[in-house]
Amino acid sequence: MPLVAGIDCGTGFTKALLLAQNVGSGEITIVSRGRSRSGINVDEAANTALNEALAHTGASRSDVAYVAATGFGRYNLSFRDIAITEITTAARGVFFLDPRPGAVLDVGSQCTRAISVSTQGKVREFKSNDKCAAGSGMFIARAAKYLEVPLESVGELSAKAEHPHPISSVCAVLAESEIINHVSSGVKVEDILRGIHDSLAERAGAMLKRVGMTDGITFIGGVARQSGMVSALEHRLGVKVTVPEECDFVCALGAGVLGLRRLASRN
Protein backbone atom coordinates (compact mmCIF):
# COMPACT_ATOMS: atom_id res chain seq x y z
CA MET A 1 0.00 0.00 0.00
CA PRO A 2 1.68 3.28 -1.10
CA LEU A 3 2.16 5.99 1.48
CA VAL A 4 1.39 9.68 1.16
CA ALA A 5 3.27 12.24 3.24
CA GLY A 6 1.69 15.44 4.45
CA ILE A 7 4.43 17.83 5.53
CA ASP A 8 3.72 21.06 7.39
CA CYS A 9 6.75 23.32 6.96
CA GLY A 10 6.03 25.69 9.83
CA THR A 11 8.20 28.53 11.09
CA GLY A 12 8.76 26.91 14.48
CA PHE A 13 8.53 23.19 13.76
CA THR A 14 8.19 20.95 10.72
CA LYS A 15 5.70 18.11 11.03
CA ALA A 16 5.41 15.05 8.78
CA LEU A 17 2.46 12.66 8.74
CA LEU A 18 2.28 9.42 6.76
CA LEU A 19 -1.11 8.24 5.50
CA ALA A 20 -2.31 5.15 3.67
CA GLN A 21 -5.63 4.41 1.98
CA ASN A 22 -7.28 1.02 1.63
CA VAL A 23 -7.97 0.50 -2.06
CA GLY A 24 -11.11 -1.52 -1.44
CA SER A 25 -12.85 0.40 1.34
CA GLY A 26 -11.29 3.80 0.75
CA GLU A 27 -10.55 4.07 4.47
CA ILE A 28 -7.67 6.42 5.30
CA THR A 29 -5.26 5.42 8.06
CA ILE A 30 -2.74 7.60 9.89
CA VAL A 31 0.38 5.46 9.81
CA SER A 32 2.96 7.49 11.73
CA ARG A 33 4.28 10.98 12.38
CA GLY A 34 7.54 12.82 12.96
CA ARG A 35 8.70 16.32 13.75
CA SER A 36 11.79 18.48 13.73
CA ARG A 37 12.68 22.06 14.55
CA SER A 38 12.47 24.29 11.50
CA GLY A 39 15.42 26.30 10.27
CA ILE A 40 16.78 28.08 7.24
CA ASN A 41 17.02 24.83 5.28
CA VAL A 42 13.43 23.67 4.69
CA ASP A 43 14.50 20.43 2.99
CA GLU A 44 16.72 19.46 5.91
CA ALA A 45 13.96 19.97 8.49
CA ALA A 46 11.41 18.15 6.32
CA ASN A 47 13.76 15.23 5.70
CA THR A 48 14.41 14.88 9.43
CA ALA A 49 10.69 14.85 10.24
CA LEU A 50 9.84 12.49 7.38
CA ASN A 51 12.66 10.08 8.21
CA GLU A 52 11.46 9.97 11.82
CA ALA A 53 7.96 9.07 10.63
CA LEU A 54 9.35 6.39 8.30
CA ALA A 55 11.51 4.94 11.08
CA HIS A 56 8.38 4.22 13.12
CA THR A 57 7.00 2.05 10.30
CA GLY A 58 10.09 0.36 8.90
CA ALA A 59 9.22 1.83 5.51
CA SER A 60 11.66 3.62 3.19
CA ARG A 61 11.48 6.77 1.09
CA SER A 62 10.68 4.67 -1.97
CA ASP A 63 7.39 3.69 -0.28
CA VAL A 64 6.25 7.34 -0.29
CA ALA A 65 4.29 7.82 -3.52
CA TYR A 66 3.27 11.44 -3.03
CA VAL A 67 4.31 14.43 -0.91
CA ALA A 68 1.87 17.25 -0.14
CA ALA A 69 3.46 20.31 1.47
CA THR A 70 1.81 23.05 3.47
CA GLY A 71 2.96 25.74 5.86
CA PHE A 72 5.12 28.83 5.59
CA GLY A 73 7.98 27.03 3.81
CA ARG A 74 5.90 24.85 1.49
CA TYR A 75 7.21 26.39 -1.74
CA ASN A 76 10.81 25.87 -0.60
CA LEU A 77 10.37 22.12 -0.20
CA SER A 78 12.17 20.75 -3.25
CA PHE A 79 10.72 17.22 -3.17
CA ARG A 80 7.05 18.21 -2.88
CA ASP A 81 4.48 17.06 -5.43
CA ILE A 82 2.02 19.78 -4.49
CA ALA A 83 1.93 22.87 -2.25
CA ILE A 84 -1.31 23.74 -0.44
CA THR A 85 -2.13 26.73 1.76
CA GLU A 86 -2.38 26.25 5.53
CA ILE A 87 -5.94 27.58 5.46
CA THR A 88 -7.09 24.79 3.16
CA THR A 89 -5.18 22.05 4.98
CA ALA A 90 -6.38 23.22 8.40
CA ALA A 91 -9.99 23.01 7.23
CA ARG A 92 -9.52 19.61 5.60
CA GLY A 93 -7.61 18.18 8.56
CA VAL A 94 -10.25 19.22 11.08
CA PHE A 95 -13.04 17.95 8.80
CA PHE A 96 -11.28 14.58 8.52
CA LEU A 97 -11.26 14.28 12.31
CA ASP A 98 -14.84 15.54 12.73
CA PRO A 99 -16.83 15.71 9.45
CA ARG A 100 -19.15 18.55 10.41
CA PRO A 101 -19.28 22.24 9.48
CA GLY A 102 -17.81 24.57 12.08
CA ALA A 103 -15.12 27.06 12.97
CA VAL A 104 -11.39 26.46 13.32
CA LEU A 105 -8.84 28.54 15.18
CA ASP A 106 -5.22 27.91 14.21
CA VAL A 107 -2.56 29.64 16.30
CA GLY A 108 0.95 28.96 15.07
CA SER A 109 4.36 30.44 15.72
CA GLN A 110 3.85 33.54 13.56
CA CYS A 111 0.21 33.62 12.54
CA THR A 112 -3.32 33.25 13.87
CA ARG A 113 -6.13 32.16 11.55
CA ALA A 114 -9.88 31.86 11.99
CA ILE A 115 -11.57 29.61 9.44
CA SER A 116 -15.20 28.74 8.73
CA VAL A 117 -15.57 25.20 7.34
CA SER A 118 -18.46 24.07 5.13
CA THR A 119 -20.41 20.80 5.19
CA GLN A 120 -18.00 19.53 2.50
CA GLY A 121 -14.91 20.39 4.51
CA LYS A 122 -14.08 23.40 2.35
CA VAL A 123 -13.16 26.92 3.43
CA ARG A 124 -16.18 29.24 3.49
CA GLU A 125 -14.47 32.25 5.04
CA PHE A 126 -11.21 33.03 6.79
CA LYS A 127 -9.37 35.81 8.55
CA SER A 128 -5.66 35.89 9.21
CA ASN A 129 -3.42 37.93 11.49
CA ASP A 130 0.19 37.68 10.36
CA LYS A 131 1.28 41.31 10.63
CA CYS A 132 2.44 41.33 14.25
CA ALA A 133 3.94 38.71 16.54
CA ALA A 134 1.73 39.86 19.44
CA GLY A 135 -1.08 37.64 18.15
CA SER A 136 0.94 34.45 17.76
CA GLY A 137 2.73 31.65 19.52
CA MET A 138 6.09 33.32 18.94
CA PHE A 139 5.08 36.13 21.28
CA ILE A 140 4.16 33.63 24.00
CA ALA A 141 7.54 31.94 23.55
CA ARG A 142 9.37 35.26 23.85
CA ALA A 143 7.36 36.22 26.93
CA ALA A 144 8.08 32.84 28.54
CA LYS A 145 11.79 33.31 27.90
CA TYR A 146 11.75 36.76 29.47
CA LEU A 147 9.78 35.47 32.47
CA GLU A 148 12.22 32.52 32.75
CA VAL A 149 9.43 29.99 32.41
CA PRO A 150 9.78 26.78 30.33
CA LEU A 151 7.44 27.05 27.36
CA GLU A 152 5.86 23.69 28.18
CA SER A 153 4.84 25.07 31.61
CA VAL A 154 3.10 28.21 30.31
CA GLY A 155 -0.35 26.66 29.93
CA GLU A 156 -0.38 25.07 33.37
CA LEU A 157 0.85 28.23 35.10
CA SER A 158 -1.66 30.42 33.26
CA ALA A 159 -4.50 28.15 34.37
CA LYS A 160 -3.53 28.79 38.01
CA ALA A 161 -3.83 32.60 37.75
CA GLU A 162 -6.01 34.36 40.32
CA HIS A 163 -5.71 37.98 39.17
CA PRO A 164 -4.92 38.12 35.43
CA HIS A 165 -3.22 41.29 34.22
CA PRO A 166 -4.24 41.91 30.59
CA ILE A 167 -1.83 43.02 27.88
CA SER A 168 -3.59 45.81 26.01
CA SER A 169 -1.02 46.56 23.30
CA VAL A 170 -1.51 45.00 19.86
CA CYS A 171 2.16 45.65 19.03
CA ALA A 172 4.64 42.99 20.18
CA VAL A 173 7.26 45.57 21.18
CA LEU A 174 4.81 47.58 23.28
CA ALA A 175 3.32 44.40 24.72
CA GLU A 176 6.76 43.33 25.92
CA SER A 177 7.11 46.72 27.63
CA GLU A 178 3.83 46.04 29.44
CA ILE A 179 5.16 42.69 30.62
CA ILE A 180 8.30 44.36 31.95
CA ASN A 181 6.15 46.89 33.82
CA HIS A 182 4.05 44.10 35.32
CA VAL A 183 7.18 42.28 36.51
CA SER A 184 8.58 45.49 38.00
CA SER A 185 5.29 46.02 39.83
CA GLY A 186 5.50 42.58 41.45
CA VAL A 187 2.71 40.93 39.45
CA LYS A 188 2.86 37.14 39.69
CA VAL A 189 4.14 35.26 36.66
CA GLU A 190 0.96 33.18 36.34
CA ASP A 191 -1.18 36.34 36.32
CA ILE A 192 0.97 37.83 33.55
CA LEU A 193 0.76 34.65 31.50
CA ARG A 194 -3.01 34.49 31.87
CA GLY A 195 -3.17 38.13 30.84
CA ILE A 196 -1.28 37.24 27.67
CA HIS A 197 -3.67 34.36 26.97
CA ASP A 198 -6.68 36.59 27.63
CA SER A 199 -5.36 39.18 25.19
CA LEU A 200 -4.77 36.56 22.49
CA ALA A 201 -8.22 35.09 23.16
CA GLU A 202 -9.82 38.50 22.71
CA ARG A 203 -8.18 39.01 19.32
CA ALA A 204 -8.92 35.45 18.22
CA GLY A 205 -12.54 35.83 19.30
CA ALA A 206 -12.95 38.92 17.15
CA MET A 207 -11.59 37.03 14.15
CA LEU A 208 -13.86 34.04 14.77
CA LYS A 209 -16.93 36.25 14.95
CA ARG A 210 -16.01 37.79 11.60
CA VAL A 211 -15.92 34.39 9.88
CA GLY A 212 -19.11 33.16 11.55
CA MET A 213 -18.49 31.51 14.90
CA THR A 214 -20.55 28.41 15.66
CA ASP A 215 -21.51 26.71 18.92
CA GLY A 216 -18.16 24.96 19.02
CA ILE A 217 -14.61 25.80 18.06
CA THR A 218 -11.80 23.43 17.07
CA PHE A 219 -8.49 24.83 18.27
CA ILE A 220 -5.32 23.65 16.49
CA GLY A 221 -1.65 24.57 16.33
CA GLY A 222 1.06 24.34 18.97
CA VAL A 223 -0.53 26.98 21.22
CA ALA A 224 -3.62 24.77 21.53
CA ARG A 225 -1.58 22.56 23.88
CA GLN A 226 -1.59 25.35 26.47
CA SER A 227 -4.48 24.70 28.85
CA GLY A 228 -4.51 28.31 30.01
CA MET A 229 -5.13 29.49 26.44
CA VAL A 230 -7.98 27.02 26.01
CA SER A 231 -9.53 28.23 29.26
CA ALA A 232 -9.14 31.87 28.18
CA LEU A 233 -10.87 31.15 24.87
CA GLU A 234 -13.78 29.34 26.49
CA HIS A 235 -14.21 32.15 29.00
CA ARG A 236 -14.05 34.81 26.28
CA LEU A 237 -16.28 33.06 23.73
CA GLY A 238 -18.71 31.25 26.00
CA VAL A 239 -18.55 28.09 23.89
CA LYS A 240 -16.86 24.71 24.07
CA VAL A 241 -13.36 24.63 22.61
CA THR A 242 -12.23 21.25 21.26
CA VAL A 243 -8.52 20.47 20.97
CA PRO A 244 -7.57 17.42 18.84
CA GLU A 245 -5.11 15.03 20.47
CA GLU A 246 -2.39 15.87 17.92
CA CYS A 247 -3.42 19.50 17.49
CA ASP A 248 -0.16 20.60 15.89
CA PHE A 249 -0.30 17.89 13.20
CA VAL A 250 -3.72 18.85 11.81
CA CYS A 251 -2.39 20.86 8.86
CA ALA A 252 -0.02 18.02 7.95
CA LEU A 253 -3.01 15.69 8.17
CA GLY A 254 -5.07 17.88 5.87
CA ALA A 255 -2.22 18.05 3.38
CA GLY A 256 -1.91 14.27 3.43
CA VAL A 257 -5.65 13.73 2.90
CA LEU A 258 -5.65 16.09 -0.07
CA GLY A 259 -2.47 14.43 -1.33
CA LEU A 260 -4.20 11.04 -1.30
CA ARG A 261 -7.00 12.48 -3.39
CA ARG A 262 -4.56 13.98 -5.88
CA LEU A 263 -2.61 10.72 -6.12
CA ALA A 264 -5.81 8.76 -6.78
CA SER A 265 -6.84 11.13 -9.57
CA ARG A 266 -3.38 10.89 -11.12
CA ASN A 267 -3.58 7.11 -11.19
Image (cartoon, rainbow, N blue to C red):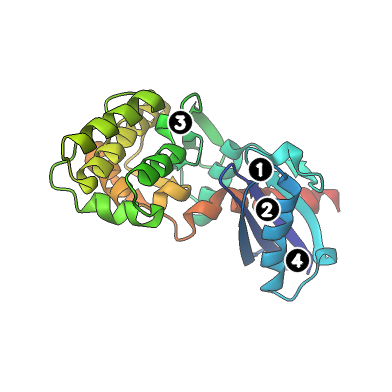
Q: Name the residue under label 3.
A: 133
Residue sticking out furthest to the left: 162
Q: Name the residue under label 4.
A: 23
Assess whether mark 1 and mark 4 are in contact (beta carbons under 8 angstroms): no
Q: Nearer the viewer, mark 1 or mark 3?
A: 3
Q: Quote the CA–CA distance across marks 1 and 3.
A: 21 Å
Image coords of residue 244 (percent x, y): 44, 56
Circle 1 residues within 10 Å: few <14, some 14–19, many ≥20: many
SS at circle 2: strand
Identify the disc placed on residue 70.
Answer: 1
Which one is nearer the viewer's eye here, 120 or 161? 161
Circle 4 residues within 10 Å: few <14, some 14–19, many ≥20: few
Residue sticking out furthest to the bottom: 58
- Which amino acid type corresponds to the residue marked 3 in the rendered image? Ala
Which residue lies at the image location 49% right of the left edge and 41% below the top edge? 108
Circle 3 residues within 10 Å: few <14, some 14–19, many ≥20: many
- Which amino acid type corresponds to the residue marked 1 in the rendered image? Thr
- Which amino acid type corresponds to the residue marked 4 in the rendered image? Val
The mark nearer the N terminus, 4 or 1, is 4
| Left or right placement of residue 44 versus residue 169 in this view | right
Identify the disc placed on residue 6.
Answer: 2
The mark nearer the N terminus, 4 or 2, is 2
Which residue lies at the image location 67% right of the left edge and 66% below the top edge? 52
- Counting every numbered tag in the picture gives 4
Residue 207 lies, with reference to residue 64, above or below; the image says: above
Image coords of residue 107 (percent x, y): 45, 41
Residue sticking out furthest to the front: 184
Q: Which of marks 4 and 2 is in front?
A: 2
